[in-house]
Image: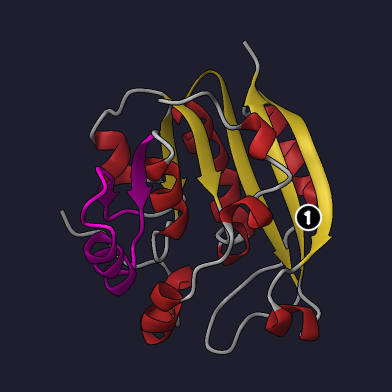
Amino acid sequence: MKTARPPGTTGYDEVASALLATRLCFDKVHRHVLHLLPPRPARILDVGSGPGHDAATLATRGHSVVAVEPTAKLRDGARNLYAELPIEWVDDSLPALGHLCAMRPAPFDFILVEGVWAHLTQAERRQAYPVLAALLGDHGVLAISLRHGPAAPGRITHPVTATEAIALAEVSGLSTLVEVETGSIQAVNTANGVTWTRMAFRRSC
């Protein structure tokens, strides 16, 4: 089933090879939410999995991972790069995750949305939150990173705030666990004034 490419994926075909070849330290990138990762083996959803490095790390650590990525060059490249790992690769995208939801997956214990949120418009973010919340199991955790600053060349981003993210989470029945402002671990982003807000939310039962 082919999924229409959302505007937020603009520019990623051109940098797919570079992203596949660049692997950042998982524990360093996600240090603010590592304590919320459930015991293995947990069901984890990586939305906007890009080159698949995070999905691969999670699979290597014994988790059952579904990786969603709409950019074919990234998704296929990641599938080839990590062919030995039991990761389920899905062609889909926020805000609807229509293909994934049609598959009626079992609830996820942890959902990772890394480097994606600023690619969504405000309307798309409003639509995405209840979709993500519905995919969480009881006490499941949703981790989202908010990128602030100029877009990378050739890409499309929109302003995002923690205040908006918290408000949307509350409407979707999620409570805030983590809200941390931090710099980028990549020198080029730091030089361009890019910062991040690392956030995590838990389903309230």
Please check the rendered image and state whether residue 81 is part of the magenta-colored stretch, yes or no. Answer: yes
Q: Which of 96/45 is in front?
A: 45
Is-magenta flag for residue 57? no
Lateral position of residue 91 relative to residue 180, left or right: left
- In the figure, residue 93 lies in which quadrant? bottom left
Query: In what quadrant of the picture does the C terminus appear?
Result: top right
Residue drawn at x 23%, y 34% is: 103
Pinpoint residue 2: horizontal percent, then vertical percent: 19, 59
Q: Position of residue 50 (x, y in %)?
A: 42, 64
Q: Residue at x 62, y 41 (%)?
A: 143
Q: Position of residue 138 (x, y in %)?
A: 53, 15
175 lies above or below 80 = above
170 or 189, nearer to the observer: 189
Left or right side of 19 for 80 = left
Pointer 1 local density, CA inside 10 Å: few below 14, some 14–19, many at least 20: few
Q: Regarding mark 1 in the picture, which secondary structure is present there?
A: loop
Which residue is rendered at x = 27% and y = 50% of the image? 90
- Depth order, front residue of 4/174: 174
Residue pictured at 36% horizontal, 58% vertical: 69
Q: Which residue is mark 1?
A: 161
Where's residue 15, x and y in %?
A: 43, 84
Q: Quadrant of residue 21?
A: bottom left
Amino acid type indicated by mark 1: Thr
Report the magenta residues as a range.
63-92
Q: How is the image coloured?
A: secondary structure
The single residue placed furthest to the left in the displayed view is: 1
* Up-down relation of residue 27 to residue 66 (above or below): below
